[in-house]
Image (cartoon, rainbow, N blue to C red):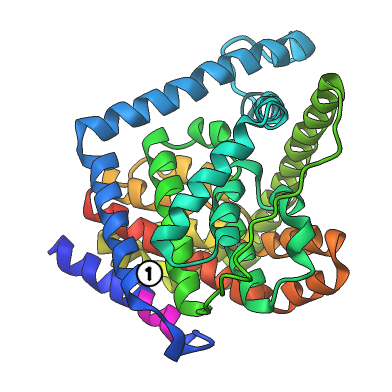
Amino acid sequence: MKYLIALLGLLVVFALAFVASNNKNKIRYRPLIVMVILQIILGYVLLNTSAGALLIKGFSSVFEKLLTFAAEGVNFVFCGIVNEGSFTFFLNVLLPIVFISVLIGILQYTKILPIVIKYIGLVLSKVNGMGKLESYNAVASAILGQSEVFISVKKQIGLLPQQRLYTLCASAMSTVSMSIVGSYMTMIDPKYVVTALVLNLFGGFIISSILNPYTVSKEEDILDVHEDEKQSFFEMLGEYIMDGFKVAIIVAAMLIGFVALIALINGIFDGIFGISFQQFLGYIFAPFAFVMGVPWHEAVEAGSIMATKMVSNEFVAMLDLGKHTAMSAKAIGIVSVFLVSFANFSSIGIIAGAVKGLHEKQGNVVARFGLKLLYGATMVSLLSATIAGIFL
């Protein structure tokens, strides 16, 4: 039965993407089939094999260790503010972002990260049938983040047609930054974080290839990655430390605003209709939760968490998921995979603003297709969660 539901889920995702396609005649089906098969194989390996479990354990243990190191710095500054044994979200989840950001900066400075990103991207371009730039950008987005990634391709931003610009932005919204992966792992099971990261990478190509099909000529398929002006090692450290701190503060501010706003709206809905706003959205998202593989009796509950992520952000939704302790392991796993991406309304402004800062005209183009960007990124999350649901 679960395989029939998974098949239905895949058909629903592809149908929704196909209906919104801007050029149905240009869709190339062979790369799509290859990438879906790859997603299924990778989902099976990560969730159902000892090799996958070993890989996930190794990945999560690295971040667990990094978070331990980060805690040393946090404790040095904030020691005594928190009672021993208690948990403070800002200190334990957000501030470690600063340390992870520093490590990314070091890997960038030593040229290790750019080489890894470039060559993984080149390999992916052979599979997905897209350009080298799109493949590079997808890998870079998963490491650098949805706004920072555009700096590395800023030389080409002004030269890109709308179709290629959409794919770059869709990749950025469909993934998450490596600097906050450790924070996610403190809120949901690391295996779902790793699975989502891998599946979303291919899912972004799949959905973009349907929504926004195009071909790139050899003359256009040039990968020209921008390198920042040479800084001293300690200048770089200072920059990445401040960047990481800005991310932590921005996320904290957004959480305060969104959690309070949702509480207000829930109170209004409860007073007028007798149900919360999240429960109301849960009924709308319940059919999507069901075709992803969530049991029907939990679909409304799962749908409300999915909707929370879309209207606020993934942090708010992950905190909400942690309160639903009675949900089955299968439902929690599927919803967890769905939550690991930047697909929410606020990301439209973040991405449009990042591009606008580099090229004003292209930033306006991004703002115009912002809702379609969110639509596509949400389809990526639905696809990844549906694939994961087969093996949970």
**Can residue 179 be seen from the camera position used here?**
no
* Number of numbered callouts drawn: 1
Residue 316, image x and y in percent? Answer: 59, 48
Residue 346, image x and y in percent? Answer: 70, 60
- Tell me the quarter of the image containing the N terminus: bottom left
**Can residue 311 be seen from the camera position used here?**
yes
Indicate the quadrant where residue 288 lies: bottom left
219 shown above or below 94: below
In the rendered image, the residue lying farthest to the left is 1
Q: Which residues are magenta?
A: 14-18
Residue linked to disc 1: 288
Indicate the quadrant where residue 124 lies: bottom left
Question: Magenta includes 211?
Answer: no
- State the SS at label 1: helix
Q: Main secondary structure of the magenta part?
A: helix
**Label 1 Cα crowd, 10 Å radius (few <14 / some 14-19 / many 20+):** many
Seen from the viewer's position, the closer of residues 380 and 258 is 380
Question: Magenta includes 15?
Answer: yes
30 shown above or below 52: below
Left/right of residue 289 with respect to residue 118 in the rendered view = left
